[in-house]
Image (cartoon, coloured by chain):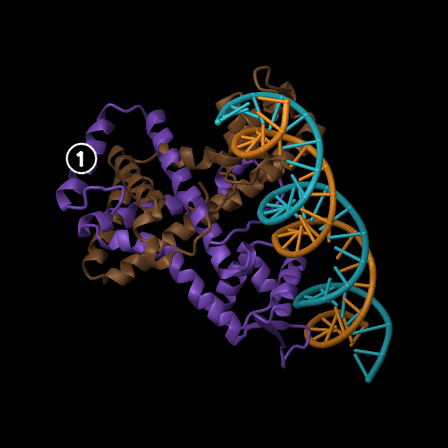
Chain colours: A brown, B purple, C cyan, D orange
Amino acid sequence: MTNEEPRTPQGLASRAEHNLSALKTMSTSDKIEEVLVALRRVIRATDLHSKKLVKTASVTGPQLLLLQIVNAKGDMTISELARDMSLSQATVTTILDRLQKRELIERVRSETDKRKVHPRLTDHGRKILSTAPTALQDNFVRRFRALDEWEQGMIIAALQRVAEMMDAKDIDASPFLDVGALDRAIPPV
Amino acid sequence: MTNEEPRTPQGLASRAEHNLSALKTMSTSDKIEEVLVALRRVIRATDLHSKKLVKTASVTGPQLLLLQIVNAKGDMTISELARDMSLSQATVTTILDRLQKRELIERVRSETDKRKVHPRLTDHGRKILSTAPTALQDNFVRRFRALDEWEQGMIIAALQRVAEMMDAKDIDASPFLDVGALDRAIPPV
DNA sequence: GCAAATTAATTAGAGAACTAAAGAAAAATG
DNA sequence: CATTTTTCTTTAGTTCTCTAATTAATTTGC
């Protein structure tokens, strides 16, 4: 422990209490600011984390994500994969090309429908994957484990709430924000 | 409201209670899984959001991030900017080149030290920025506002906790994970 | 004061990611 | 069986990102 934090239940509790008492006097817009700042920190930390990971794994972010998905979901088509990664088919094809050149995946034509291609991990690809993604969350997991039960519970509940609020379809809001255009997305976790 | 969610205090409270009661019977690794899944959802939602935003703003992610930082922090050098964005100087220079070509920023040489260059938003750049980033968080903010005070407080406290755990320097853990190599990072929030 | 070292930014060169558009092959439709 | 649709690949063009020079300005040591 280098940057020491109070790790005792008292320490955690008092921190939380501090936040709660500060909240009483906080305007809604202040609260929103707080929540957005915290979110940005979380997201930035994730990015940094994943960048570092990428270096150690010797694959890029999108490549790693692809490997993870293929590993988790088994045989799937390029289009499914593209949908899962929120990328275009063409992009997935080129990422696959590079992974194939390095022999981390291979392409298997479907027997039943010869248009379809199933990317499949090679042994080498599996090995890369097994070394990489564990490191990613290790730190966070270790710290999370050290928390009190009640705080773990609070965090789960809160994150789920936030996730809901964020990934709920924007349908209800779109009428006055929407710009048309469905979108894509990327990055590795 | 299309995917209706119970928006009443009762609805929210009962959902939270549900989570809490489920927690009692949940193993630590299950909890960790829950928390990671929720995190991934949050991050993915953010990415999708920012992708959409990027389309509407007609700038790319890194470009938008750069504009946001310059706007927020005023006169700064390229190296500061690079540090803030966790990119190399050279990368920032090329991003600036493109923004300058589109006249969203201009370069101002420092008077006191002529090696230094201060990127500055043009009116057009400010306009781009003002249309874009509001939309980004609107949905989330609207939903957040609709929550009960206690739930807003819980979410802030939890997110801050998570942010701490994530962006605390990895120093203490690195001895057995570290691969050397400082890292960089990217994306727009 | 001026040569040497340092600092700031740019340029050059190259790999990867991404998109849109067009093309090729297989399967479904009528 | 000709047409349409689906699935994947190819191509061309932009952007992002890095490392390794390069240029210019400042600071340091003597």
Residue B34, position as x, y percentages in the image: 34, 31
The vertical placement of B7 against B28, above or below, is below
Chain letter of mark 1 equals: B
Pointer 1 local density, CA inside 10 Å: few below 14, some 14–19, many at least 20: few
Left or right: residue A100 versus residue A157 is: right
Of B180 and A180, nearer the camera is A180
Residue B4 falls in image quadrant: top left
Of A86 and A79, nearer the camera is A79
In this orientation, does residue A13 appear?
Answer: yes
Amino acid carrying label 1: it is: Glu
Residue B62 falls in image quadrant: bottom right
Residue B139, position as x, y percentages in the image: 33, 53
- Residue at 47% across, 58% down: B56
Left or right: residue B2 versus residue B178 is: left
Indicate the secondary structure of the residue bearing disc 1: helix
Q: Which residue is mark 1?
A: B17
In this orientation, does residue A121 appear?
Answer: no
Left or right: residue A116 versus residue B138 is: right
Of A144 and A44, nearer the camera is A44
Residue A57, position as x, y percentages in the image: 61, 33
- Residue at 50% across, 40% down: A86
Of A146 and A154, nearer the camera is A154
